[in-house]
Amino acid sequence: MADFDKESFKKDVINNVKNLFRKTIDEATQEQVFQAVSYAVKDHIIDRWIATQKAYEEKNAKTVYYLSMEFLMGRALGNNMINLTCYEQVKEALAELGFDLNVIEDQEPDAALGNGGLGRLAACFLDSLATLNYPAYGCGIRYRYGMFKQAIENGYQIEKPDNWLKNGNPFEVKRPEYEVEVKFGGYVATECREGKNYFVHKDYQAVRAIPYDLPIIGYGNNVVNTLRIWDAEPVQEFNLNSFDKGEYQNAVEQANLARNIVEVLYPNDNHYSGKELRLKQQYFFVSASVQRAILKFKENNADIHDLPNKVTFQLNDTHPTVTVAELMRILVDEENLEWDDAWDITCRTCAYTNHTIMAEALEKWPIDLFQKLLPRVYQIVDEINRRFVLKIEDMYPGNQDKVRSMAILYDGQVKMAHLAIAGSYSVNGVAKLHTEILKKRELRDFYEMRPEQFNNKTNGITQRRFLLHANPLLADWATKKVGDGWITDLPVLEGLKKYATDKKAQKEFMDIKYKNKVRLAEYIKEHNGIDVDPNSIFDVQVKRLHEYKRQQLNILHVMHLYNELKANPDMDFEPTTFIFGAKAAAGYKTAKLTIKLINSVADVINNDKSIKGKIKVVFIENYRVSNAEIIFAAADVSEQISTASREASGTGNMKFMLNGAVTLGTMDGANVEIVEEVGKENAFIFGLSAEEVMKYEKDGGYYPMDIYNSNPKVKKVLDQLVDGTYSNGDKELFRDLYDSLVMKDVYFTLKDFDSYADAQKRVNKAYKDKANWAKMVMLNTACAGKFSSDRTIEEYAQEIWKLEKVEVTL
Ligand code: 26W
C-alpha cells in the first residue's frame, strides 16, 4: 500500500493504546493492542470510504442493496489489511513493537451474524462487490448476540451466548443522523382529504432504527463499500412522572420491543419456526433499509419512476421478502402513486434468490399473526394476492390446482416464496442442478408462467479470505508460479496445471500441505487434547449439522472401518484422521444426538491401542469462520456427501478445492460443477443421483429394512448403535438414530452406504500413490477458478442488476 508509512503506523498504535486505555504499549494486553491496531488501520480506511461514497454520488450510479438476515463476516482485521494491501507492512511494524500479528488477530471475536452457507455467501459477495468496483450496500441486523458458541461437555453440544460486542467493535461507525422509525401493530383507518382516500396507521408501537456502518474494503482499488446493520432503540425514554397509566404501559411495551428485536440471531439453518419475533426482525430491518434507500434515491433523483434504473433490492432467500409489500406501501401511501404504477416499479426493483428446496425451510406465516403485527402491509399483500390470483385464473381458466399451488395467501398462510416470485423480475438458484430442480419441480408452475424470470447463478467464494489470508504458504507459492493476478482473477490459477506432473513442484505443494496439517494438528492438540498425525489422511467434514448433509453416513462408515481393522489388524490401510466440525440448531434433537455419537465414537476409537492409531476421530468444537480458515488449508479429503438433490450448492466444497483437497461427494449442488471443472478422475464420486433420489421419493421411498437384513456390514454398525458399544452399555442412548435409519431413512443413508464405503476405499488406495495424489490435489487448486465469488458477482451485476463499475481515486 503506497500511502503506508511504517514509522507513523507504529506511532499511531502507541498513541491509540495511550488514548484508549491510558497505558504505555508495554503495559497493554494483546486484546488492547488489537483494538489499537484496528483503529490505526481504520485511519487508512476512512478517507477511502468517504472518497468512494462521493464517487458514487457524483456518478449517481445504480446501487444494489443486498438484503439479508445474515452476514457471516468472521474477523475483520486480517481481511481489511489484506484488501488494503498492507498486511505484510503491518506485520513488520508490529514485530518491531514486539507483537506477533497472528496473536493480535486471534484477539478479535468473529462477527457471526449468520448460521452457515447463506450468511457466509453474503459476506463473500460483499467482498467481491467492493473488489469489482460495484456500488453496493449490505443491509442487515446488528444482533447483540450472534451465532451461539458451541462447547462440548461430556460429548454433548452446549450453547453459550456470543457476546461479540463486549469490548466494542473498532471498525463500526454509528450513524444516528440516518435513523428511521418502524411501526408495528395497531390498525389502519381511512381518511378522506380533498376527495381522496388515505390509509392511516393508528395506535401502533414504534421503534427507532439506528444504522451502524461497517466498511467493506475492495482489494487494492480504494473502494470501501458499506455493510449497514440496524440497531433498535426505544422511541421515548420513559420519564415516570409524565405518563398517565395508559401511556406508561405503552412506553414500557415500546421499550421492550426495541430491546427484544435485535437481541439474538435465530440459530436455525434450513428450518422455519414461525416465531413472531422473527417476523418482527424481518420487517424491522427491511422497512428501515427500504425507507433509507428511497430517501437516498430522492436526494439525487427527481422522479420516483426512475427507481428501477438506480436501485435493485436483492432478496437473500425469502427472509426479507416483505420488501415487496413495504416498497408498495411507500410508493402508494407516501409517494401517492396509483397501484399499477407502483406495482410496475416494485417488480422491476426486486429480485429474489432461492437457497434451498428443503420443505421445512419454507416460510409460511400464519395470516392472523402477520395481519396483527403488520396491518397495513397485510392489506397490501392481500391486494397483491387478489390480482395475482386473477392472473393465474386468466392463464389457466377453471384450474383451481394452479391457484392452490401458486397463490400468495392460501390455507390461512402468507407464502413468502410466492410473494417474492410475484414481486420480482429475477428468480435465481445457486447452482446449475439446483436451478434445474427449481424449474422442473419445486417452482415448476411459476417457471411455466414466466420462464424468462428464472436464471442460475452458481455460488462462489472469495479467494482473498480463503486462500490469500487463510493459506499464506500456498498463496505465496501460487504467486511465485503464476504471478499474483489470481488475487482478483482466480482463473489465472489454471497456469498451475502444468506443474501438476512436475516432481519438484509436487514436492513443494505437498510440503505446504504438510505444514498446514501441522498447524491444524497443533490447534487440535491445544483445543481437544488429541494427538493427530500430520502424515495421516485428513478427511474433513465441516458444515452445519443436518440429516440431509449426512454426517451420520460419515460416522457410520468410521464405525464400519473400525470393525474391519479390529477383525483384520494387518489390513492394508493408510492411517486416516476423520475430522468433524458442526453446530446443531439448539432444538434439533437428531442433530444433537449425532454430535454425541461422533464424540462417543471418537472416545472409543481414539483410546483403543489395538488399532495403533490408524484411525483417529476428532470433533472440532465451535466450528466458525476463523477456525475454518485453518481447517480448509489442512484438508486432504473434502466430504460433500449430502443426499443428491438436497444441497442447493454448498460453498465449503469450493474452499476445500481451492486449498488443494479432493472432493469425496455425491453428484449434488455445486459438486456437479466441481467435477466438471477438475475432471471425474480427480474426484471421488458415489451414490444415487438426484434423479434417482427424486424417483424413489415420487414412488413413496424405499425399504431400508431390506438393506439392514441383507447387508451384514450395515447391520453390524446399526446394531452397534443399540448394543452399548459406544455408550458404556447404554442400549437406549442412540435408539432414536437407529430407529429412524432402519424404519424410514428419509435421506438414503443406508442406500448409499456401500457406494460410499467403496469410494472411501478408492480414496485410501489413491493416497498411497504419492505422485498421483499430488497431481490430483494440485489440479483441484488449478481448476478452482470458476468458483470465485468474483465470477458470480460479475454474473449478477451484468445479467440481473445491470450495474456499472465506478473508479475511485484518492
Ligand atoms: C427460516 C429458516 C431458514 C434459515 C436459513 C431457512 C433457510 C435458511 C438458509 C436458506 C439455509 C442455507 O444457508 N442454505 C444454503 O445456502 C447456501 C448459499 O447459497 C448454499 O450453498 C447451501 O447449499 C444451502 O444449504
Image (cartoon, grey):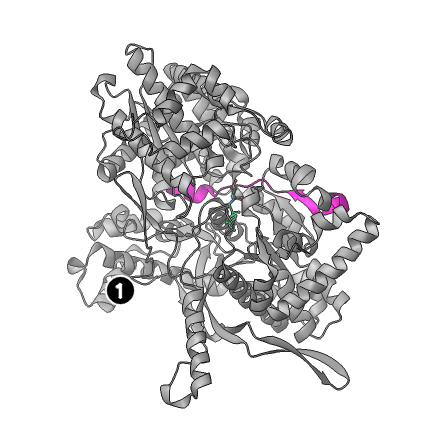
60 vs 341, nearest the viewer: 341
Residue 791 visible in rendering: yes
Instruction: Tell whether position 463 is magenta.
Output: yes
Give above or below for 147 relative to 524: below
Q: Please provide percent x and percent y for residue 793.
A: 57, 47
Toward the viewer: 760 or 387?
387
Where is residue 29 shown, x and y percent of the image?
19, 57
Q: Amino acid at mark 1?
A: Asn
Quadrant of the rendered structure where residue 56 is? Answer: bottom right
Left or right, 410 with respect to 229, comes to right
- Looking at the image, which is closer to me, 454 or 496? 454
The percent coordinates of residue 747 (x first, y second) are 51, 32
Total numbered badges shown on the rendered structure: 1
Please give the name of the residue rendered at 35% of the width and 45% of the height, measured from the top-left corner. Answer: 626
Q: Position of residue 443 (x, y in %)?
A: 67, 43
- Camera-side residue: 405 or 148? 405
Say which residue label 1 marks: 16
Residue 637 makes an appearance in the image: no
* Ligand 1 under 8 Å from disc 1 Cβ: no
> How would you rate the neighbour count of disc 1 (Cα within 10 Å): few for under 14, some for 14-19, many for 20 or more?
many
- Residue 384 colored magenta? no
> From the viewer's perspective, is residue 266 above or below residue 380?
above
Under circle 1, the secondary element is helix
Stretch in magenta? 448-471
